[in-house]
Image (tube, helix red, strand yellow):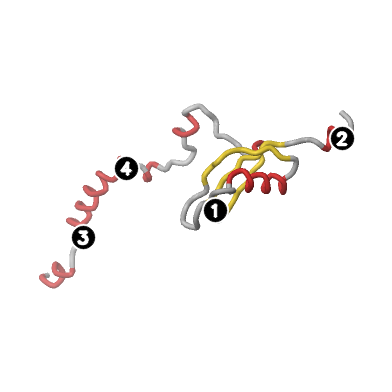
């Protein structure tokens, strides 16, 4: 590989655009460029030529990491966070009602 070939190394960049301040960034495509600054320019020319936007993210494709594809990654949890699941809420109403029945109110104290 000669000196000229090293200088012509291009990377793939993923482009994300935010259309207005209240919207989130959306992936709009990819560009190929030799540097970060040129990738931003190419992305602007390619994806914002006719559209308006308030922000543009350009990220090297090899800097994006994907989660493992097996389903255990999403179902196994190291920390017990069962309290975040909906199944426990039905029991909460029952426990709250039982607690209210055991606790004396101010009216109960006044009557005694």
Front position in the image: 109 or 89: 89
- Of the two numbered discs 4 and 1 on the same chain, state the one appearing first in sequence: 1
Image position of 88 (left or right of 48): left
Q: Do callouts 3 and 2 mark residues in contact (Cβ within 8 Å)?
A: no
Which residue, as the protein is rendered here, is positioned at the far left? 111
Q: Position of residue 83 (x, y in %)?
A: 37, 45
Residue in the image at 80% along x and 36% along y = 8
- Please name which of the two marks, 4 or 2, marks the residue nearer to the observer: 2
Considering only vertical position in the picture, is 56 above or below 65? Answer: below
- Please name which of the two marks, 3 or 2, marks the residue nearer to the observer: 2
Tell me if mark 2 has few (under 14), some (14-19) or many (20+) residues whose alpha carbon lies within 10 angstroms of its own: few
Mark-to-mark CA distance, 4 and 2: 60 Å
Front position in the image: 23 or 103: 23
Residue position marked by numbered label 3 in the rendering = 103
Q: Give the quadrant of the C terminus.
A: bottom left
Q: Secondary structure at mark 4?
A: helix
Which residue, as the protein is rendered here, is positioned at the far bottom? 110
Residue in the image at 23% along x and 49% along y = 93
- Of the two numbered discs 2 and 1 on the same chain, state the one appearing first in sequence: 2
Residue position marked by numbered label 4 in the rendering = 86
- Of the two numbered discs 3 and 4 on the same chain, state the one appearing first in sequence: 4
Q: Position of residue 74 (x, y in %)?
A: 47, 34
Q: Position of residue 61 (x, y in %)?
A: 64, 37
Q: Secondary structure at mark 3?
A: loop
Residue position marked by numbered label 1 in the rendering = 53
Mark-to-mark CA distance, 3 and 4: 27 Å
- Of the two numbered discs 3 and 2 on the same chain, state the one appearing first in sequence: 2
Mark-to-mark CA distance, 3 and 1: 58 Å
Residue position marked by numbered label 2 in the rendering = 4
């Amino acid at each position: 590989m000669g000196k000229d070939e090293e200088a012509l190394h291009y990377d793939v960049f993923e482009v994300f655009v935010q259309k207005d301040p209240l919207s989130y960034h959306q992936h709009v495509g990819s560009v190929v460029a030799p540097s970060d600054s040129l990738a931003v320019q190419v992305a602007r020319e390619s994806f914002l030529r006719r559209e308006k936007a308030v922000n543009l993210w350009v990220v090297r494709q090899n800097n994006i990491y994907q989660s493992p594809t097996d389903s255990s990654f999403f179902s196994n949890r190291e920390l017990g966070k069962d309290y975040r699941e909906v199944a426990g809420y039905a029991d909460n109403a029952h426990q709250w009602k039982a607690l209210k029945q055991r606790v004396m109110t101010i009216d109960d104290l006044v009557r005694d």
